[in-house]
Amino acid sequence: MTKLLVVATGNPGKLREMQAYLANSGWELTLKPDELEIEETGDTFAANACLKASQIAQATGNWAIADDSGLQVDALNGAPGVYSARYGKTDSERIARVLNELGPEVNRQAQFVCVVAIASPDGKIVLQTEGICRGTILHAPRGNGGFGYDPIFYIPEKQLTFAEMTPQLKRSLSHRGKAFTALIPQLEVLSFEL
Ligand code: IMP
């Protein structure tokens, strides 16, 4: 039997991405109702993913999935972190702010983090996984693909920024890809138990 999983986002792009990761999982993914707005008030990615999944599950009476992600720059003490989406008005403003704050700093180590959480219809968090992708921050953007901070996030082993990679290569290395890869076997066990 197909089970319904409400995605705690209003963003159809995120729904499509999660559908691609969870194809053949036996769960049918659907967008949350527009009128349900959840504020990301947590101070960690895990707290935000859990509060979104839990509140959407309780409000809809269905199973719910949420993710929260962002960029952490070592020399900026982990900023922009949970404020990644709110670090400026546009992607280019957010990138400019990170580059400006980092200035000529030599330590350009950074990571993308993604936490995915699944809540049962009573709001209890039953699954939570995390994916981390380490890289470095370039001095200027490179590449036209992807979104967000992709043009300044460089993977030395591939000699490419996320914005220069094919979507498949980015998915195989990315924080989100890793979080979902860890989630899938656990979701299969959960489906089996239901
Ligand atoms: P979320 O939708 O609350 O998870 O916001 C995450 C924010 O972090 C996005 O708006 C981006 O600014 C940034 N971010 C997360 N994942 C990525 C990525 O894969 N590439 C570039 N930026 C990302």
Image: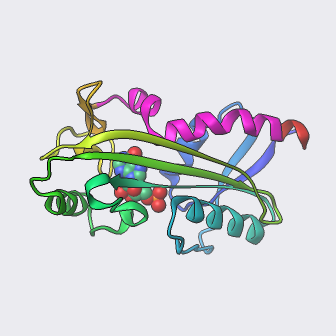
> Is 96 situated left or right of 153 in this image?
left
In the rendering, at what x and y percent does residue 184 appear?
A: 68, 35
Q: Quadrant of ligand 1?
A: bottom left
Extent of the magenta region: 165-190
Query: Residue at the left extreme?
Result: 104
Q: Is residue 68 magenta?
A: no
> Picture quarter containing residue 156?
top left
Q: Residue at x 74, y 64 (%)?
A: 57
Q: Nearer the viewer, residue 113 or 78?
A: 78
Query: Would you say 111 lies left or right of 58 here?
Result: left
Q: Position of residue 89 (x, y in %)?
A: 27, 69
Query: In this figure, what is the number of numbered marks?
Result: 0
The C terminus: image quadrant: top right
Q: Is residue 17 above or below residue 158?
A: below
On-image quarter of the N terminus: top right
Question: Residue 63: x percent and y percent?
Answer: 77, 56
The residue depicted at 33 percent of the width and 42 percent of the height is 146
Residue in front for this viewpoint, 14 or 50: 50
Residue at image point 65% right, 33% down: 23
Q: Is residue 157 visible?
A: yes
Residue 183 lies in the magenta stretch: yes
User: Does the image show residue 26?
Assistant: no
Principal secondary structure, stretch drawn in magenta: helix
User: Can you give x and y, in whole percent of width and height, for residue 40 in the image?
Assistant: 52, 71
* Left or right for 190, reference 184: right
Q: Nearer the viewer, residue 189 or 79?
A: 79
Quick one: 34 or 45, which is closer to the camera?
45
